[in-house]
Amino acid sequence: MESYLIAILTIAGIYAVLALALNLQFGMTGLINFGVVGFYGLGAYTSALVTELLGLPFAAGLAAAIAVGAVAGAAASGLSLRLSGDFLAIVTLGFAETVRLVLNNEDWLTRGPRGFIISTRPVPDTLGRDGASLFYLGLVLVLALVAFLVLERLRRSPYGRTLRAIREDDLVPATLGKNVFAYRLQAFVIGSVLMAAAGSIYAHYVQTITPDNFTTPIAILIWMSLVVGGAGNNVGAVVGALAVTAIYEGSRFLMPFIPWLNAEQMSALRFIIIGIALIAVIRFRPEGLLPEPVNLPPSRTAQSSTSQQQYQVTGGTAS
Amino acid sequence: MTALPLRIEASGLTKRFGGIAVVDAVSFQAHAGEIVGLIGPNGAGKTTLFNLLSRVLRSDAGTLLINGIDATRRAPHELATLGLVRTFQLARELDRLTVLENVLLAARDNRGERLFDALCRPAATRKSEHAMIQQAREALSIVSLAPHEAKPAAALSGGQKKLLELARCLMSGADIILLDEIAAGVAPHLVEEIVDLVARLNREHGKTFVVIEHNVGVISRLCSRVVVMAQGSVIAEGSFETISRDANVIASYLGQAA
Ligand SMILES: Nc1ncnc2c1ncn2[C@@H]1O[C@H](COP(=O)(O)OP(=O)(O)O)[C@@H](O)[C@H]1O
Ligand SMILES: [Mg+2]
């Protein structure tokens, strides 16, 4: 039971990174990425190939996944953002499907649907089985924490304000001198990098990856996490990922109570339960459990007395 | 007579929509310190001309110089750097950002807007943001929106949203400001305030304005020169007195509007 909990938390942590990355792209910048699993899977396989075929350590696999994620993110967004916004949604969807097809069919490299076995682990050999899984959970939490802190700093900064402005109406920041294309490209690439890094961590955690690990249902879970948690809110993205993972994994425990369902029906039922939760949130809390925070202005007392005076003079005549 | 430098110098600007030239080989100039009125009936192509001057739309022909620099093929965001900003006929406030954030967005050279500085230089970011907040508050108090700074922009009235756009233009520090029907739908006492403000910014800060406006009173009080457009072309140009006596103008616009 305890090891099961650790396993769920590890997966939830990885999903939290994916949800945080999607929050930067969609929640803050308004970029629609339907290809989350493409970047996730690309990171996983890149890391696996680098460590297993080249015999390099995990750190090299992670670095390669990050590099490939950046290049793929720049290519997908660079091509489509020059055109209209809706184009990105289609391109990312096509990208994920292409990644899946390549992983399935190039089996001289990826071993196709049989799965790719990974022996490299970023865990000291001296740890036992339980110690190793705890260590791995810690590793995932460190990645999630780093992602959270970086994205939260961006959200609170003037950079994040520009991203939100682009999300609201890109013509306004453009006419005020912001290079909208560059901002969108950066936000998309940072998100893709985080997704690829999550893929790398995932690959070395499960140690056997197949193209089926990176299909649309996972992308749907991540989108649901963000919408349930609250798009635009980093804490919301994490809470959403925890909630969705808890519901999805927790519904396994229903199995003994409904023995007449087979495994396939059971897995469909789990998605139905998450779907109902999603509908309930959208119905009763359309902005998610934790809506986007409002950046309230700092108090005026910190400001110089001259501007305060000016404010009072005009404030008196206004209205 | 020493000619003042040209802020805007457009020649032969043309924009076609589906074969129809909505702006047809228009040449347009604005000198430093001028307030130019741009009038004409609805559909004359005034807003489209603004879109060409701010590069929101790409022109099909013609050339554009802003502050003496060729802007014919520039991206819209480069125009703000060259010193030209604009408001929109339908106010484009950013609803989910606060009023103060809407203005802060217009800051030029705010370090924290750069990815590297936002991530790796928190102290420098905070310092520059602090200075910008002070400037933004000044811009807001100039347009009498200071008491509303913490509200989401969606909560402002229609007239206040226009004032917010003006505050953004001030914050940008640009020396050329295009105002597209900024007084339309604004309460009369606010119209007075806007007129006084534009006159003052022009007089005291030397800002150049191009003003699209249907309110003839506003045009006659503000503008040293008026350009009249109809059906995509400039049909008259001169002082308000001159153009209001022009038979063409009366036929195509003033007569119709009355
Ligand atoms: N994006 C567009 N596509 C097609 N026609 C347009 C577009 N924008 C403006 N027009 C047309 O161009 C003409 C001029 O419009 P506009 O510049 O808005 O006029 P004004 O601001 O002088 O009232 C109108 O007939 C309008 O319908
Ligand atoms: Mg118009």
Image (cartoon, coloured by chain):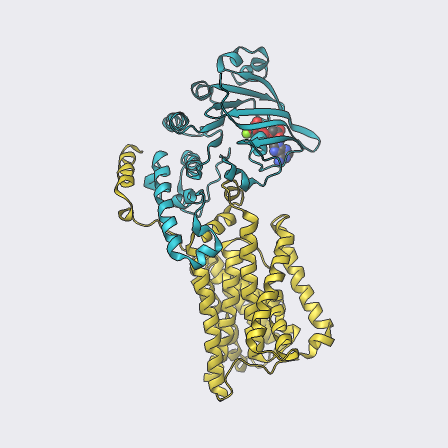
Chain colours: A yellow, B cyan
Q: Is residue A1 something one can see in this rendering?
A: no
Residue A136: where, in percent of width, then height? 49, 79
Q: Residue at x 42, y 33 (%)?
A: B159
Residue B185: where, in percent of width, then height? 45, 30
Q: Nearer the viewer, residue A298 or A253?
A: A298
Residue A284: where, in percent of width, then height? 45, 58
Q: Residue at x 49, y 12 (%)?
A: B241
Q: Is residue B136 something one can see in this rendering?
A: yes
The answer to whether residue A16 is left or right of residue B145 is right
Residue B114: where, in percent of width, then height? 47, 52
Residue A200 placement: quadrant: bottom right
The answer to whether residue B218 is left or right of residue A179 is left
The answer to whether residue A317 is left or right of residue B182 is left
In this view, A293 is above or below A13: above
Q: Nearer the viewer, residue A171 or B225?
A: B225
Residue B99 placement: quadrant: top left
Q: Quadrant of the C terminus of chain A?
A: top left
Q: Nearer the viewer, residue A115 or B65?
A: B65
